[in-house]
Amino acid sequence: MKYEINKGTLAIVPNEKENSLVYEDEDRYIIDQTPFEIMESSCRYFGSTYNGRKDSARDILGAEYKVPIIVEDTDNLIVFPTTSPLSDDCIWISLKRVKNFEKIDACNTKIIFDNNKEIIVPCSFRTVENQVSRASRLDLIMRNRKNR
């Protein structure tokens, strides 16, 4: 089963054997693609390439690494990585679905989604805070450009 990121997507988490655990509103799916493969195919599905979207985000933000990606630009469907996107441990989080996040310990952060589902990601609170801030900035810049 191929998967395209959509408005219901909460998070894409690496799972065993080259597959992913995808969290949606009320469901979880095991998808036979890595999180990065889901990112690449979703970008293509919505008319671009992952590298094109990454380069655009880099230019807009002036950032070089762990940039958020606008998967679909009509609704500013933006996801951000928790680590390097090429890392086997990279989790992708949908910005619009994040309600809050809390520090668990130095290496783990709880992300609470707008439907009150929660996941714990193996990265620091500061990393999540930086990624949410960066993705929010990209969202704001794109909204402002569309409204001109």
Image (tube, helix red, strand yellow):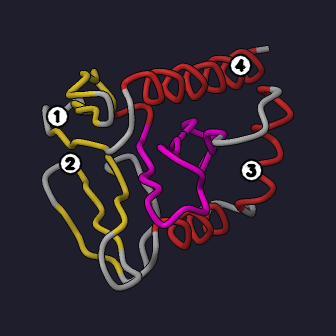
Amino acid type for the residue under numbered disc 4: Ile
Task: Compare marks 3 and 4 and give the one earlier in the sequence.
Answer: 3
Q: Is residue 64 above or below residue 136?
A: below
Task: Compare marks 3 and 1 and give the one earlier in the sequence.
Answer: 3
Amino acid type for the residue under numbered disc 2: Asp
Amino acid type for the residue under numbered disc 3: Arg
Q: CA distance from mark 1 to mark 4?
A: 26 Å
Q: CA distance from mark 3 to mark 1?
A: 28 Å
- Return the residue nearer the eye: 109 or 45: 109
Which image quadrant is residue 13 in? bottom left
Asked if disc 4 and disc 2 are in contact, CB closer than 8 Å, the reply is no
Residue 69 counted in the magenta span = yes
Q: Is residue 39 above or below residue 17?
A: above
- Dot 2 corresponds to which residue? 25
Tell me the crowding category of disc 2: few under 14, some 14 to 19, or many 20 or more residues within 10 angstroms, Cα based. some
- Dot 1 corresponds to which residue? 115
Asked if disc 1 and disc 2 are in contact, CB closer than 8 Å, the reply is yes
Q: Circle 2 sits in a helix, a strand or a loop, which is it?
A: loop
What are the residue bounds of the magenta stretch? Answer: 67-94
Label of residue 144 in the image: none
Task: Compare marks 4 and 2 and give the one earlier in the sequence.
Answer: 2
- Dot 3 corresponds to which residue? 53
Residue 114 counted in the magenta span = no
- Dot 4 corresponds to which residue? 141
